[in-house]
Image (cartoon, grey):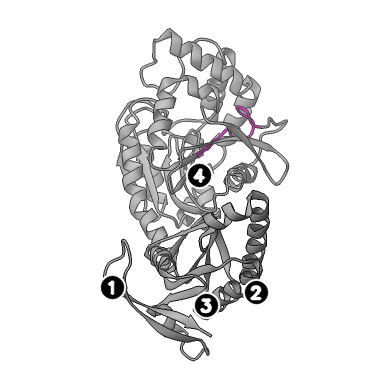
Amino acid sequence: MPKTQWAVTVDGAYIAYQDVGAGPHALVLIHGWWSHLELSWEDPQYARFMDRLSRRMRVLVFDKRGTGMSDRFTEPPHLEARMDDVRAVMDAAGVDRAALLGWGTGGPQLGGVFAATHPERTVALCIDPSVHGPWMAEPGETEEDLERDIERMMATWGEEVPPSGYDEAPTDPAFVRMEARAARFSATPGSIAALTRMWFHTDVRDVLPTIRVPTLVFHKDSGWSNPESAARAAALIPGAKTVNVGGSEGVITLGDPDPLVTAIEAFLGPIWDEEQDLDRVLATVMFTDIVDSTAQGAALGDRAWADVRAQHDQIVRANLARFRGREIKTMGDGFLATFDGPARGVRCAEAIAAQVQPLGVEIRAGLHTGEVAFEGDDVAGLGVAIGARVGAKAGPNEVLVSQTVKDLVAGSGLAFEDAGEHELKGVPDRWRLYRVVS
C-alpha cells in the first residue's frame, strides 16, 4: 500500500492523498461518493484497478473532505472548497498540470467544474456521469425519491448488507464485510446523507459547455453508468468523445479494469504527446565536469577534496546566477545547466574555467543550442544528448561548442577555432565542433 500523505488547503483543511506509480504523466483520480485510502487496498479488485491504472502514469488519489482519512466537517463543504481539495493535492505532490479521472459526483460535478475553472492545470478530463440529481438522473427521480433512498441508506449504513454499485448485488460474505467496514470508517450516516443532498442539488448543466479541455465520457452497462447518461453529459461538453467500457458495475474500481484503463490510455496518449511538444523550447545546454576528479580526490584526501568540491560548486552557482543560467542538476563532479541565450552560456563556461584554476583543478565544458523538453525540474531531448557528447570531447580547461552555438553568437565578440569533425556517440551524422579562445 502506498504511503498516505496530507495536503493542506487554503482554508486549512487536511486532505489525505496517495501518490501511486511513477509514470511521466500525472492523473488525479476523484472518487464518486465516499472512500478510505487505506482500507480500499484490502479489496483485491481495488488493488488490481490501481495497479493497472498506475502502470504507465502517476496517479494521485485522495479522500474528499468529509470522508475517509481527510478532515471532517460540521456543514457540507461547497463546491469551491471541493475544488480546493483537488488543487491542494496537486500542489502537495508538485504537479502543475494533470489529467482528471472522475466518476459519479467526481465526474461532471467536481471534475467538470474543476476543468472548466482551471484549464491551465487540467490536461484532459475523463468522466463517468453516473450521478444522482434531477438534472442528470433518470426521468421521474424526485427529491422525495432521494429522501426515501437516504432514509433507507442511513438505517443500514455500515451494516453487512449487499453494497450498491452492482446491478446484481454480490453475495461473497467477505466482500460484503469488507465494504461495510470501509463504509463505517469512511463516513457517518449523517455526513453521508448531507453529502448526498448537496450533490443532488449541485446542477452544473450551465458549466459543462464552458469546458475547453479534451474530454472523454465513458460508461458501463449498469443502472448508474449507462449510455443514456453518458450521451446527456457529452452533449453538453464541446467536442466530448464517448466510449462504452463494458461491465455491469456502477463503480469504476470494480470488475475488469483493462477495458477502462486501455480506453483512457488511448485517449490521453496523443494529448500527452501534444503537451510534450508544446513544452519543447530552444535552449543552450551547458555540461561541465572536473577533469581527473577521482585521482585528485585520492591525492588530496576526503576532507580536503570535499572542501575543493564545495568551492568549485560555489563558483559554478555564482556564475550561473551572473549569466542567468538555470541549474538543472549536478552529476558526479559536474553540472548541467541551461541558458536562454548561447553567448551567456559560453561566457559562463569561460568564467567557471578561469575561476576554478586557483583551486588546483581544471574543468571541461561543452555547449549546444537545440530543442529541449523541460520535464518538471529536469530537461531531456536530443539537444541535451548532443550537449553531453560535446562536453565529453573537451579537454582540460577547454570549452567546446557545436557549430549551432558558433553561428548563433556571431557579432558577440566571442572567438573560436576549428576543432574538427567528430562522431558523437548515439547522435546521427558527424558534427563540427569549435574551441572557445580568449
Residue beneath disc 2: 322
Q: Are marks 4 and 1 in contact (CB under 8 Å)?
A: no
Element class at badge 2: helix
Point out residue 419 in the picture as x, y percentages from the top left corner: 38, 79
The dot on residue 85 is none
Q: Amino acid at mark 3?
A: Val
Residue beneath disc 1: 430
Identify the magenta region.
60-70
Is residue 193 left or right of 263 when viewed as pictured?
Answer: right
Q: Amino acid at mark 1?
A: Arg
Q: Nearer the viewer, mark 4 or mark 2?
A: 2
Q: How many marks?
A: 4
Figure check: 72 above or below 427: above
Residue beneath disc 4: 111
Residue beneath disc 3: 346
Figure check: 212 above or below 58: below
Seen at 37% across and 33% down, the residue is: 52
Element class at badge 3: helix
**Marks 4 and 1, Cα distance to the nearest angstrom?**
51 Å
Furthest-left residue in this view: 429
**Marks 2 and 1, Cα distance to the nearest angstrom?**
34 Å
Q: Earlier in the sequence, mark 3 or mark 1?
A: 3
Element class at badge 1: strand
Task: Return the residue nearer the eye: 327 or 144.
Answer: 327
Element class at badge 4: helix
